[in-house]
Amino acid sequence: MLELSTPIKFVKLVGERVAVELAKRGVETIEDLLYHLPFRYEDRLNPVPMSALQAGTMASVIGEVRGTVLLQTRSMPLFEMTVGQGLSTVKCMWFRGTYLRDKFHVGQMVALYGKLEPSRSSAGKFKMIQPQFEVLPSGTGADAEFSMLEVGRIVPVYESLGGTTAWGAKLGSKWLRRVIWALFEELEKQQLSKSADQQVEVIETLPGAMRARLLFPERLKALKSVHFPEAGTPMTELMSATTSGHRRLIFEELFYLELGLELKRRRMREREGTAFVTNVKVREAIKQVLPFHPTSAQKRVLGEIASDMRKPQPMRRLLQGDVGSGKTIVAMQAALVAIENGYQTALMAPTEILATQHYLSARKLLGDVLSPRTGKPYRVTLLTGSLDEATKREARGRIFRGETDLAIGTHALIEDKVDFDNLGLVIVDEQHRFGVQQRFKLMKKPGALDPDVLVMTATPIPRTLALTLYGDLDASVIDELPPGRTPIVTRRTTEERAEDVWGFVRKQVEAGRQAYIVYPVIEGARDDQPELDFPQDTESDETAASVKAQVDSPAALRNDTKKKSAGKATKGAKTGGAKAKGTKSSVRTEKLFEPKKALRAATDMYEELRMGRLAGLRLGLLHGRMSADDKEVTMRRFQRGDIDVLIATTVIEVGVDVPNASVMVIEHAERFGMAQMHQLRGRVGRGAAKSFCILMTGGRVSDQAEARLDAMVRTQNGFELAELDLQQRGPGEFFGTRQAGLPEFRVANLIRDRALLELAKAEASRFASEPDPAVSREEKDAVWTRLKLQWQRKYGLVEA
Ligand code: ADP
Ligand code: MG
């Protein structure tokens, strides 16, 4: 009997050998195969007639091969094929297409998919460059049995799983259709011969009552309809994954994620924590350290935190607040609640610079006052990885013996060697820089009672991500900036205008202000350096342009060799970045063979500016390869105003607070991610002075980069920027490559499926809280079993 967990090798048409190939792509069981869903569909039942095609669109076309020819151009072989339908024809071209010569024969029916380009030679005609194709079955021969999978229906198109069958056929769409079709036939036969509760065990994962309420089909039916849609299913729904089958599968996946998070949250509420009191004395302690009137958002958020802290359950709260919204002081207030109750607080920051900054400001804030409870000063200890061993040992000792009220540090604080005397509160600053795993680890810090945990982030997290990554936390938002801030003026410019920018920086410094100038890399023309934590946009638009350039005219093909040598010459030229002007073809030359341009880098520009345009000003240099001591010294000098202009990499990105700094120049802004730029801009505009952010580009600006820069100029709203960022980069990259633990989805797409995510969350909470009489015991058990499986396998988030 087949079950979803049955190894794939037992599936018809697969076998041992292919199973090994499939395993390489993560397809090991029947369930894995069934969840390898089509990524698009072709309507071969009602294909769009060629006469109705439109240039510029992606189109799926069925026609008859009318003729083929292999052209030998000077640079490469070019395979051309004409496909016709009545009087209309489309011309297809493949570069280096020699291998296609024996594939096509006149009279064959083929299905093509690709972008339709207007033909240059004859108006009203089209061409397709390198389209995807399938030769359709002729209705006789070995393929006849499966011909109904290829024609006369809506046909699923799959991503290839790589590898080949024993006889050398690709494990592509055609193969997958057959295997999956045969598999469904078998599963359906099996379903028919079984009783209802057996079926629940094998296939279904959502209770019938829930399915009925939400109008979702059964699981097997949903899968079948997604793989082999019935005639009449609207193509738009298929392509946007909004058929009821799709929706059910997406919902199911999100439901189990949310259910897991819901359980985590519930389990946490059952654990025992500390119930802090917030009496007059505690309030007094807080009041006496406040350097300013808190904003109403700060007050509200502190209220939410304090109310959590009063409860006997451990607090698990996420505090979001845009850069500069004043999270630090809220954190300090929370710390005081714990401390005034006789407990220790740990404050963790992602970098040494930040930890040190927090330490210094905590000392400043708490330095002159006495605790109303003890009548003594507060004891603050710094513990970071770079301190020497003796100092660290001593710090750990003070923490362990309870001679510290507030321990501030980097992740050295959660290393196993650190034991607290009685830790009551853990605060994690800039949480997104730590992975989810680290967060879980931190929350499990041993002790008699669970400490309260407050995590803070200045990266506005789009709601979908917050729901998936932080669904186990309660959330607070500081949605208001402290008073007296003037909006930061953001401008775009290019490297060519650098002189003006340096002039402006000089003027600002002369007016008593300070400035940052940020570079994507530390030195030289290398971009493999750790500071650049943003992956480059794909260069696909450029390749497309070059292919187009080659195709547009035969002349382009003939010129090819000439261009290559021109490219070489440019590459050899010392200046780099040749600025080709003039004729059309030289523009093309530049596009095709633009040498990799040297990036302006922090160390080089530090030297250049110090000797050149910023001579006479006090310049500082800060980057990730400096020792922690050097970094700290530099940062402090900048903070004290002993440095006018800080030339840096993104090490300053997060959290650094120097209110007198009013200018942020970002060079190669096209290379930075949205969140990074937003964070960098947040380093200025923190005082009363009018502040400026200058985004300088130097190099090719991709469409995506263009959109980022536009958005930066247009708005300062972090949440708006975050949404665009999420759309551009996808959830996996949203937090940068350092983020670990974002769940992987098989069907769901966090950008597309927000509404279903909300629904899943509501349903998960309902399922976990209300015993529904309409849901049978077996169905419930099936849900719990499924939950365990999905969490273990897909999210790896199961705690030991
Ligand atoms: P972030 O939320 O980015 O961590 P900070 O806590 O560093 O922001 O605060 C940014 C700046 O605003 C700091 O200089 C801080 O002293 C100041 N600040 C915070 N809250 C207020 C307030 N209510 N009134 C005036 N200044 C404030
Ligand atoms: Mg901060």
Image (cartoon, helix red, strand yellow):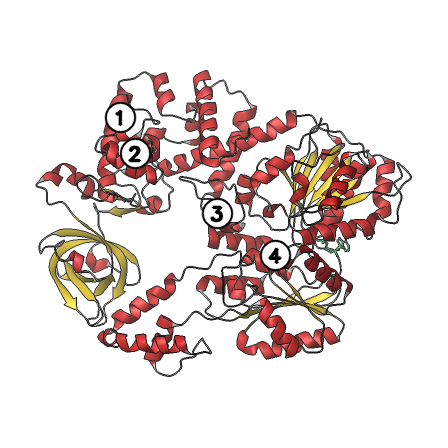
Q: Position of residue 432 (x, y in %)?
A: 59, 47
Q: Which residue, given by chain and number where applicable, does mark 1 sit on? A: 188
Which residue sits at x=24%, y=26%? 186
**Residues marked 1 and 2 touching at CB (< 8 Å):** yes
- CA–CA distance in space, label 1 to label 2: 10 Å
In depth, the one of 750 and 22 nearer the eye is 22
Q: Position of residue 211 (x, y in %)?
A: 42, 28
Q: Is residue 172 above or below residue 215?
A: below
**Residues marked 2 and 3 touching at CB (< 8 Å):** no
Residue 717 badge: 4
Image quarter where the N terminus lies is top left
Q: Which residue, given by chain and number where applicable, does mark 3 sit on? A: 732
- Tell me if mark 4 has few (under 14), some (14-19) or many (20+) residues whose alpha carbon lies within 10 angstroms of its own: some
Ligand 1 image-quadrant field:
bottom right
Q: Earlier in the sequence, mark 2 or mark 3?
A: 2
Q: Earlier in the sequence, mark 1 or mark 4?
A: 1
Q: Position of residue 392 (x, y in %)?
A: 73, 44
The answer to whether the residue bearing label 3 lies less than 8 angstroms from the nearest atom of ligand 2 is: no
Q: Earlier in the sequence, mark 4 or mark 2?
A: 2
- CA–CA distance in space, label 1 to label 4: 52 Å
Amino acid type indicated by mark 1: Glu
- Tell me if mark 1 has few (under 14), some (14-19) or many (20+) residues whose alpha carbon lies within 10 angstroms of its own: few
Q: Which residue, given by chain and number where applicable, does mark 2 sit on? A: 224
Q: Is residue 295 visible?
A: no
- CA–CA distance in space, label 2 to label 3: 29 Å
Q: In this rendering, would 752 be left or right of 95?
A: right
Amino acid type indicated by mark 2: Lys
The image quarter in which residue 610 lies: bottom right
**Residues marked 1 and 3 touching at CB (< 8 Å):** no
- Tell me if mark 2 has few (under 14), some (14-19) or many (20+) residues whose alpha carbon lies within 10 angstroms of its own: some
**Residues marked 4 and 2 touching at CB (< 8 Å):** no
